[in-house]
Image (cartoon, grey):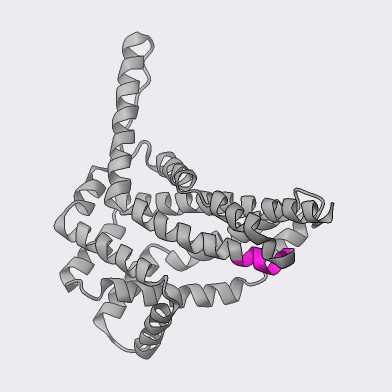
Amino acid sequence: MGVFIRFVGIVAISVIGWGANAQENNIDTLIDALGVPEILEIMQTESIAYGRGVGAEMLPDGGGDTWQETAAEIHDLDTMMRAVKAGFESVLGSEDIAPLIAFFTSDTGRNIIALEVSARRAFLDLDIEQAARRSYRAIAKSGDPRLAQVSDYIGLNDLVEYNVVGAMNANYWFYRGLTTGDAFEMSEAEMLSEAWAAEDETRTDTREWLFAYLLMAYAPLEDAQMAAYVALSKTSHGRALNRALFVAFDAMYTGTSYALGRAISDQLMATDL
């Protein structure tokens, strides 16, 4: 972890400015190495489809062309990237991320990221996702070595819990958005209750999705490559990266969820006028 000392005077200002710019550049390099731009494009496709589905359920006539455009505007790629980058900077701003950059720009790291992006893109096809889920269920209670490695990876990074909490937070902020106008009235307790109502179902589904996705993604990896990735999760910089990923994407999803709820409320009010 890097330590920045603030000196008094013009020289100190220039030194601090140089350090901050250098770290920002390092974070940009790490974000690119992690395939975040490609993953965000996939998430944008998923989120626009989800937003349009919400409109189809909650708005008269599905909201029409106006809602189609609104859902796309809420999930603007540049806005999503700014939220993610801010999250990375908030967690990794003073961390030594050189070991992370070294890993993810190595042959093993580049291979892992390429496989993660490819599998996430493939999961846009529901038939492929369902096939991956069936494949996981078929070996869920076996002694498959790769299953054991993926299980270790999920456990070390607390991926199930992080994803569940992220989903519940997104639900809560959607309700907060809905109640900013006069179309809906909910107390804080009601919003929290609604947001967490599907916790058990979400946890079960999230666990299966994670295993299905990661088993599919990492199938081509050699055991040694997968072991190296699991080992990275045990290091301090690996744990910092995990925190950064969830802080960043939680901020992104809560922002878009709030905007989605607010837009639904606004359009309902406009329809009633």
Within the image, what quadrant is residue 3 found in?
top left
Task: Name, please, the residue furthest toward the right.
Answer: 273
Instruction: Judge by depth and name the residue closer to the eye, 77 or 190.
Output: 77
Instruction: Judge by depth and name the residue closer to the eye, 118 or 90.
Output: 118
Secondary structure predominantly adopted by residues drawn in magenta: helix
Task: Name, please, the residue furthest toward the top.
Answer: 9
Instruction: Judge by depth and name the residue closer to the eye, 191 or 68.
Output: 68
Q: Is residue 221 above or below residue 186?
A: below
Q: Quadrant of the N terminus?
A: top left
- 153 in the magenta segment: no
Q: Position of residue 197 (x, y in %)?
A: 67, 70
Q: Is residue 47 above or below residue 243?
A: below
Within the image, what quadrant is residue 199 found in?
bottom right
Task: Name, please, the residue furthest toward the front.
Answer: 65
- Is 173 placed left or right of 12 in the picture? right
Residue at image coords 28%, 30%:
22
The span shown in magenta is 53-59
Residue at image coords 15%, 58%:
107
Whether residue 195 is visible here, answered yes or no, is: no
- Is 21 placed left or right of 181 in the picture? left
Q: Position of residue 63 (x, y in %)?
A: 68, 61
Q: Position of residue 162 (x, y in %)?
A: 48, 61
